[in-house]
Image (cartoon, rainbow, N blue to C red):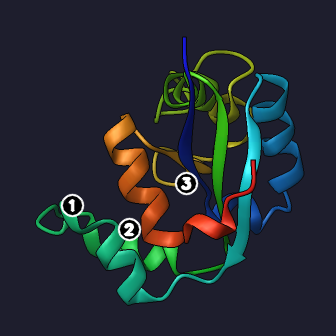
Amino acid sequence: MAIQRTFSIIKPDATNRNLTGKINAVFEDAGLRVVAQKRVRMTAAQAEGFYAEHSERPFFGELVEFMTSAPVVLQVLQGEDAVLKHREVMGATNPAEAAEGTVRKLFAQSIGENSVHGSDSAESAAREISYFFRPEEIVG
């Protein structure tokens, strides 16, 4: 196993309910460490660029609108096999299918308002981290 970094977003549905600390406690209890973090209100241009791979999908406009509707918390998490560990701890996209104790089982309101985003591969993590963070902002 290798120490690696992954990208995480705590989404508007969770920040609106003041769940940042509770969600991060789940990540930290699983062995992930927050090595960079910022709370921002994403612009439409940022959200469109970040989710560009979904631009042809019917839900794209709704996704951009949701991600710009309230502040989000952007994070870099670090730990043993962080990408896989983070995805396990987040749980299935559909909270009804998520395992007990996962972030989405605990906090998500629906498939669309599922509280968190996480990179799906090491390559995606590197791209997503560099989209929002400069190397000097990551301390760990």
Query: Which residue is depicted at the point 81% across and 55% down?
Result: 20
SS for dot 1: helix
Query: Which residue is depicted at the point 47% across and 33% down?
Result: 94
Q: Nearer the viewer, residue 93 or 138?
A: 138
Instruction: Measure the C-alpha gap from mark 3 to mark 1.
Output: 17 Å
Q: Which residue is mark 1?
A: 54
In the rendered image, which quarter is residue 102 located in?
Answer: top right
In the rendered image, which quarter is residue 138 located in?
Answer: bottom right
Amino acid beneath label 3 = Glu
Instruction: Measure the C-alpha gap from mark 1 to mark 2.
Output: 9 Å
Q: Earlier in the sequence, mark 3 or mark 2?
A: 2
- Verify CB contact (< 8 Å) between mark 1 and mark 2: yes
Amino acid beneath label 1 = His
Q: Which residue is mark 2?
A: 63
Q: Residues within 10 Å of mark 3 (few under 14, many from 20)?
A: many
Q: Which mark, residue 99?
A: none
In the rendered image, which quarter is residue 36 located in?
Answer: bottom right
Q: Nearer the viewer, residue 92 or 51?
A: 51
